[in-house]
Structure formats: structure tokens, C-alpha cells
Image: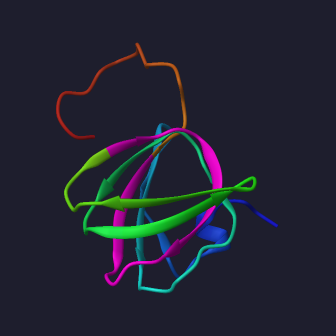
């Protein structure tokens, strides 16, 4: 079975952009929803809503409360999660595919 969150929980994650350098995921769930164990590479998470979640990984459990409108670094990890709050969880994940910075031809502005 794949550990890609888009495969483990396709009803909660969707790809909104992808190229050779990054993959951008949109995540949305409702109170009580749970994810299957899955893996995230090094990523930046941007919260679109305030939410409360329980995360479980390797016998460890933590609860997080995040406000809307914050960007956070998410180091590579495997976990499962549960929405334990009273609101939807909505977030964007920008997953990094490469560690090296490209030194080739540069583009000015969005590509």
C-alpha cells in the first residue's frame, strides 16, 4: 500500500500543482475525520483555517492547535491524524522534491 497521502486519503487530500521541484496539496476535513498513516517529505504547511488535531507516529501522540493564516515548516515525517476540534481543517502543503537549488537558466516571475 502506498504511503502517499493522496493515495491513503483521496477524499481529504488533492494535488493542486506539481512540477519537478514541488508538489502542492490541498487538505480539507471535518470534525471527527481521521487519516490513515502516510508520509510527508520536507514541506511548508499554510493553514487556511484554525484547527485542532491529534497526530500519532511511532507510539507518540501530540495535539496541535493552529490559527488560520500561518506558515509552518513540516520536516519529513510519517503520521496519522484526527480532527479533534469543532471546525474543519483546511491547509495547503508545499512538498519539496529536491534539496539542491537549481543554478540553471532562471525565470523572472511565476513559471
Quarter location, residue 41: top right
Residue 81 at x, y = what percent? 57, 68
Work out whether 104 lies above or below 39: above
Work out whether 40 lies above or below 2: above
The way the protein has been coloured in the rendering is rainbow
Quarter location, residue 73: top left
Residue 45 at x, y = what percent? 37, 50
Closer to the camera in the image, 47 or 97 = 47
The N terminus sits in image quarter = bottom right
The C terminus sits in image quarter = top left
Q: Is residue 52 left or right of residue 37?
A: left
Give the residue drawn at x 29%, y 59%: 47
Closer to the camera in the image, 42 or 96 = 42
Is residue 101 found inside the magenta-colored segment of the image?
A: no
Give the residue drawn at x 60%, y 75%: 9
Q: Specify the segment rendered in magenta.
A: 72-94
Give the residue drawn at x 43%, y 19%: 102
Give the residue drawn at x 41%, y 85%: 30
Work out whether 81 lies above or below 95: below
Amino acid at each position: 500500500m502506498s504511503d502517499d497521502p493522496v493515495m491513503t486519503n483521496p477524499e481529504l487530500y488533492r494535488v493542486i500543482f506539481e512540477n519537478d521541484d514541488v508538489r502542492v496539496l490541498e487538505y480539507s476535513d471535518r470534525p471527527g475525520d481521521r487519516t490513515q498513516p502516510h508520509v510527508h517529505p520536507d514541506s511548508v504547511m499554510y493553514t487556511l483555517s484554525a484547527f485542532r488535531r491529534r497526530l500519532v507516529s511511532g507510539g507518540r501522540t501530540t495535539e496541535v492547535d493552529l490559527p488560520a493564516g500561518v506558515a509552518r515548516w513540516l520536516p519529513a515525517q510519517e503520521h496519522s491524524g484526527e480532527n479533534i476540534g469543532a471546525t474543519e481543517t483546511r491547509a495547503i502543503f508545499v512538498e519539496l522534491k529536491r534539496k539542491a537549488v537549481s543554478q540553471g537558466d532562471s525565470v523572472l516571475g511565476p513559471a
